[in-house]
Image (cartoon, coloured by chain):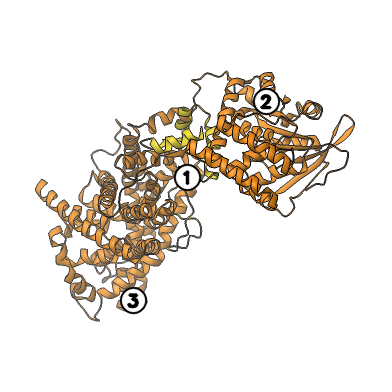
Chain colours: A orange, B yellow
């Protein structure tokens, strides 16, 4: 901190962050300044010398704060400096475009009793915004010089310095805190003046009533102060008994009321009261109490229509490339090298079928994450959370639970970890138990392939329906938990700060999309690769087994399969795949690919024509792009570029599934996949956050619920058929 | 005005956006923002961001979770 130079006036600049304080400081001091730290603090301080009327003035730039409540280090430094250094003048730099907020700090500085002047900075922006400020009235009401300035253009700065030094005078009383409080202050103030000194006596009396820990600590160092502290405590208790609230709140409340009245008197908004931003107008619709929810579900339906349909041609293309062309090349190379049959089988039936079976769905995720990136970057996701929250409250659930639930759509693990933002354990636990019902991205490939295989033409709606079913079941589960496991407590309102709408930048969207999707690719190269190899090994053990049904995998799955017979998929293939989904949900698809596709084509090496294959890949990609564009354009009502053909994204696996499931059993399977026990990572998160007992409860509850829902779905589908 | 805000938090039936609450209280949103910050500093309200960083051991994304959907909301509730 700069030392005070004798005989040189000391002027401090105080104000809110971004009020232009530093701009004025720089303009007044020029190069005559230096930056250091406050003694013993990490907060930087700038001090310098300004020239005024032929003499030098020491100028200190205090840290920007919104208040002097001393809740933060910056606030404490600003307050202590004015109280201890007793500057000749404190210049409050206020942002004229946001006067009311800035006046709150100004009023507190006035209470410190220092000679004060007010700089109404950024006056040009305020005028451009249609804000007129009655400077003379404000000057009269505050009793201090008020000078309009534009710091960035150096306008009004000379005048500011002159009025501040020549005309500023202490203005110890501004806010009237009400009868009881004023009586208490009047009782304390003479004692404070006698024991501590007359400077800022009123302010210190108020702080003692508030129970300000710093002021009380300072007073407690002298035994002579004890009666003063007892008196302050007694008076504060009397006031709190009258108002039913603590003095700190009552003081701040009165101060805000005073500032609000002041701003109303001096500020005139010349712009039309109907002046509304684009964000306001869009919010009228999308955050509407009634329309908000249908708009949210409509947008989500559109996202899934785009995801399922626009990606379909690319799904087919990746399938042909990986499971057709690439598998053919690997087979041909290994056959030419006379590789052992087991190695060929492992690579083609195990790894390529498993990993390739999942990678086929990369286009689905790319489109999904692109759409979600548009919603996120535009600022809509905040509104989605807002309207979702209305639904939560409507059903008696805690409003803040929406955050972990929305996060859970990406992945359940961060969704569960996000419950830490909830205040009490009951809310954290209840929300954490609901999160696994949010359809994470890993379940999407399963939805897409079954929906395309069994419900062509309605695949997008089926996928969307599963997401909605997950939300509905989470809500119902929440209600059930609240009525049984957790006692109901009163919900409290909360306020949401919504960001303005923005036009998403393409580069940002693509970065977003890829960063989300690359984790999926990484997972395919690690967890899914390993799982595919394990499933392949279990399907081929004991050594020499002919029929995979007799393998270790087949036998173990067959033992459990009857449990699923009432759901329509009581076969070992489906049961075994579901079991592997506990590792990660995508593994259901890789396991099905290994089970259903492995061994189909690997035995006989087909002749390979690299040029033809490359042509197939390149031409296929071009066709997929064209087809995808046609599909996207055809979503617009009245335009149909694809005829009656519905985008299906046929793959080898979808054809295999059609041979092993019926539409009814496929529907039951999808519902079961949506609900049943979470993957190990999610169980691990549940265990670490809530303990092993609740993790076990989640596994059992979700699996039982999945079985019941799957059974009802199967029966309903049969009945409808 | 702070007491009015706390009363609204206790009594209102559902969530509300900062802009709407500001309109109800007849103050600018920036002023209400300051009041909410003051109530948070007093320990009467809590402030949470929609996109809290999560330390997740389930993957190796090291700070950036590729699956997190950012709601970008700032949420105030009674402490």
Residue A509's mark? 1
Say which residue label 2 marks.
Answer: A142
A718 relative to A217 in the view: left or right: left
Could you give the CA–CA distance between mark 1 and mark 3, rounded to whole angstroms? 41 Å
Say which residue label 3 marks.
Answer: A343
Q: Give the letter of the chain under mark 2.
A: A
Q: Quadrant of residue A129?
A: top right
Q: Quadrant of residue A701?
A: bottom left
Instruction: Report whether residue A480 is seen.
Output: yes
- Please name whichever residue, A272 or A215, is drawn nearer the observer in this view of the structure: A215
The reply to the same-chain question for discs 1 and 2 is yes
Q: Where is residue A697 drawn, in percent x and y?
A: 28, 62
- Camera-side mark, 2 or 3: 2
Q: Give the letter of the chain under mark 1.
A: A
- Please name whichever residue, A510 or A40, is drawn nearer the observer in this view of the structure: A40
Q: Earlier in the sequence, mark 1 or mark 2?
A: 2
Label 3: state its secondary structure: helix
Residue A175's mark? none
Q: In this view, does A217 lie above or below A682?
A: above
Q: How many marks?
A: 3
B57 relative to A261 in the view: left or right: left
- Please name whichever residue, A688 or A26, is drawn nearer the observer in this view of the structure: A688
Q: Give the letter of the chain under mark 3.
A: A
Q: Name the residue: 75% across, 52% down.
A: A39
Q: Earlier in the sequence, mark 2 or mark 3?
A: 2
Q: Which of marks 1 and 3 is nearer the N terminus?
A: 3
- Discs 1, 3 touching: Cβ within 8 Å: no
Q: Name the residue: 70% across, 24% down.
A: A143
- Camera-side mark, 1 or 2: 2
- Discs 1, 2 touching: Cβ within 8 Å: no
Q: Which residue lies furthest to the bottom in this view?
A: A543
């Amino acid at each position: 901190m700069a030392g005070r130079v004798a005989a040189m006036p000391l002027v401090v600049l105080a104000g809110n962050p971004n009020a232009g304080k530093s701009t004025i400081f720089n303009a007044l001091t020029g190069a005559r300044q230096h930056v250091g730290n406050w003694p013993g603090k990490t907060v930087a301080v700038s001090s310098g010398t300004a020239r005024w009327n032929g003499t030098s003035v020491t100028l200190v730039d205090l840290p920007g704060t919104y208040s002097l409540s001393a809740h933060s280090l910056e606030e404490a430094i600003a307050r202590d400096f004015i109280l201890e250094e007793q500057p000749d003048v404190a210049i409050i730099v206020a942002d004229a475009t946001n006067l009311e907020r800035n006046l709150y700090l100004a009023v507190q500085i006035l209470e410190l009793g220092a000679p004060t002047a007010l700089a109404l900075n950024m006056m040009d922006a305020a005028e451009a915004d249609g804000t007129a400020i009655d400077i003379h009235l404000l000057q009269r009401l505050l009793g201090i010089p008020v000078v309009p300035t534009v710091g960035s253009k150096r306008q009004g700065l000379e005048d500011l310095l002159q009025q501040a030094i020549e005309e500023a005078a202490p203005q110890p009383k501004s806010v009237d805190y009400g009868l009881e409080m004023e009586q208490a202050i009047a009782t304390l103030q003479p004692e404070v003046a006698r024991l501590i000194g007359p400077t800022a006596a009123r302010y210190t009396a108020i702080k003692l009533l508030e129970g300000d820990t710093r002021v009380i600590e300072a007073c407690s160092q002298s035994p002579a102060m004890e009666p003063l502290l007892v008196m302050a405590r007694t008076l504060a208790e009397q006031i709190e008994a009258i108002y039913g609230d603590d003095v700190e709140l009552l003081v701040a409340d009165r101060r805000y009321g005073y500032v609000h009245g002041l701003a109303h008197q001096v500020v005139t908004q010349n712009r039309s009261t109907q002046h509304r931003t684009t964000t306001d107008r869009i919010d009228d619709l999308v955050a509407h109490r009634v329309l908000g929810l249908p708009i949210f579900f409509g947008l989500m339906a559109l996202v899934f229509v785009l995801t399922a349909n626009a990606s379909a041609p690319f799904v087919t293309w990746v399938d042909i490339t990986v499971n057709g062309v690439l598998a053919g090349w690997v087979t041909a190379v290994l056959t030419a090298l006379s590789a052992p049959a087991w190695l060929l089988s492992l690579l083609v039936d195990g790894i390529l079928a498993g990993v390739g079976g999942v990678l086929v769905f990369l286009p689905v995720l790319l489109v999904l994450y692109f759409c979600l990136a548009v919603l996120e970057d535009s600022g809509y996701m905040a509104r989605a959370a807002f309207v979702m929250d209305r639904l939560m409250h409507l059903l008696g659930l805690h409003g803040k639970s929406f955050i972990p639930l929305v996060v859970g759509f990406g992945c359940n693990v961060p969704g569960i970890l996000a419950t830490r933002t909830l205040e009490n354990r009951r809310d954290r636990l209840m929300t954490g138990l609901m999160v696994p019902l949010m359809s994470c991205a890993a379940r999407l490939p399963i939805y897409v392939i079954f929906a395309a295989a069994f419900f062509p033409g309605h695949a997008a709606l089926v996928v969307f329906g599963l997401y909605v079913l997950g939300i509905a079941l989470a809500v119902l589960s929440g209600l059930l938990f609240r009525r049984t496991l957790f006692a109901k407590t009163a919900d409290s309102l909360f306020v949401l700060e919504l960001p303005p709408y923005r036009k998403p930048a393409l580069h940002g969207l693509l970065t977003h999309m890829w960063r989300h999707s690359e984790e999926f690719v990484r997972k395919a190269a690690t967890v899914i690769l390993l799982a595919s190899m394990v499933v392949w090994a279990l399907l081929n053990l004991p050594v020499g087994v002919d029929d995979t049904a007799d393998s270790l995998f087949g036998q173990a799955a067959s033992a459990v399969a009857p449990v699923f017979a009432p759901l329509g998929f009581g076969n070992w293939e489906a049961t075994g795949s579901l079991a592997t989904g506990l590792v990660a949900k995508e593994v259901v698809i890789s396991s099905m690919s290994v089970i259903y596709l492995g061994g189909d084509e690997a035995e006989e090496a087909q002749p390979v024509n690299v040029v033809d294959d490359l042509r197939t890949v390149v031409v296929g990609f071009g066709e997929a792009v064209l087809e995808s564009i046609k599909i996207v354009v055809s979503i617009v009502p009245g335009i149909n570029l694809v005829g009656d053909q519905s985008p299906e994204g046929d793959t080898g696996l979808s054809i295999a599934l059609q041979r092993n499931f019926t539409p009814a059993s496929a529907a039951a399977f999808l519902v079961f996949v949506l609900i049943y026990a979470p993957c190990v990572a999610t169980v691990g998160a549940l265990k670490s956050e809530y303990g092993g007992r609740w993790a076990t409860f989640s596994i059992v509850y979700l699996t039982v619920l999945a079985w019941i829902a799957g059974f009802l779905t199967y029966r309903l589908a049969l009945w409808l058929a | 005005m702070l007491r009015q805000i706390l009363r609204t938090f206790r009594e209102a039936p559902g969530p509300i956006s900062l802009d709407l609450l500001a309109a109800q209280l007849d103050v600018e949103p920036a002023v209400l923002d300051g009041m909410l910050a003051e109530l948070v500093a007093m320990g009467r309200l809590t402030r949470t961001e929609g996109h809290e960083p999560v330390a997740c051991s389930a993957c190796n994304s090291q700070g950036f979770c590729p699956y997190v959907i950012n709601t970008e909301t700032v949420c105030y509730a009674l402490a």
